[in-house]
Amino acid sequence: MALNHIDGHTMTIIKTHLNEIMEARGLTNADVHYGARVSLQTVARWRSGTLGSLKPDTVNKLKQFLNVKDSDLYTIEEEPIESDDNG
């Protein structure tokens, strides 16, 4: 599910909270990789803070391993796009 939608005024952004969850629980990338059965690259992308899309299978694996809700794992926000008009 791609969510980086731009309508001319706003852009939809997926903000992830995996880094905060992992830090609070003392989890490493390897812990999440093995526990949720997702790739290390996936863990790194989710820890970066923003995503271009969500894969339902990945979301479900992370939610199950971490025992969290969607809203704990990520939020979807609309951000204004600044105009480059110079004049």
Image (spheres, grey):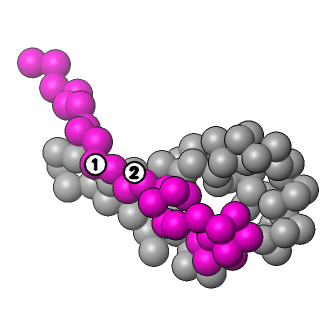
Seen in the image, is 64 located left or right of residue 3? right
The amino acid sitting under disc 1 is Glu
Camera-side residue of 40 and 5: 40
Going 38% across and 56% down the picture, which residue do you hit?
A: 76
Whichever of callouts 1 and 2 sits on the residue coming sooner in the sequence is 2
* Secondary element at tag 1: strand
Name, please, the residue furthest toward the bottom: 57
Tag 1: Cα neighbours inside 10 Å, few (<14), some, or many (≥20)?
A: some
Using the image, determine if residue 50 lies above or below residue 54. Answer: above
Disc 2: CA contacts within 10 A as few (<14), some (14-19) or many (>=20): many
The residue pinned by badge 2 equals 13
Tag 1–tag 2 contact (CB < 8 Å): yes
User: Seen in the image, is 16 located left or right of residue 77?
Assistant: right
Query: Residue 5 sits in which quadrant?
Result: bottom left
Is residue 46 in view from this perspective?
A: yes
Q: Secondary structure at mark 2?
A: strand
Q: Tally the numbered discs.
A: 2
Residue at image location 74% in from the left, 40% down from the top = 23
The location of residue 53, given as percent across then percent down, is 50, 65
Q: Report the quarter where the C terminus lies.
A: top left
* Residue displayed at 81% across by 60% down: 32
Q: Is residue 28 one of those drawn in magenta?
A: no
Q: Nearer the viewer, residue 84 or 46?
A: 46
Which quadrant of the rendered structure holds the N terminus? bottom left
User: Residue drawn at (82%, 43%), measured in percent from left and top?
Assistant: 26
What range is drawn magenta here? 59-87
Q: Residue furthest top?
A: 87
Labelled disc at residue 37: none
Q: Which quadrant holds residue 81?
A: top left
- The image shows residue 24, relative to residue 62, as above or below, that is above
Q: Which residue is mark 1?
A: 78
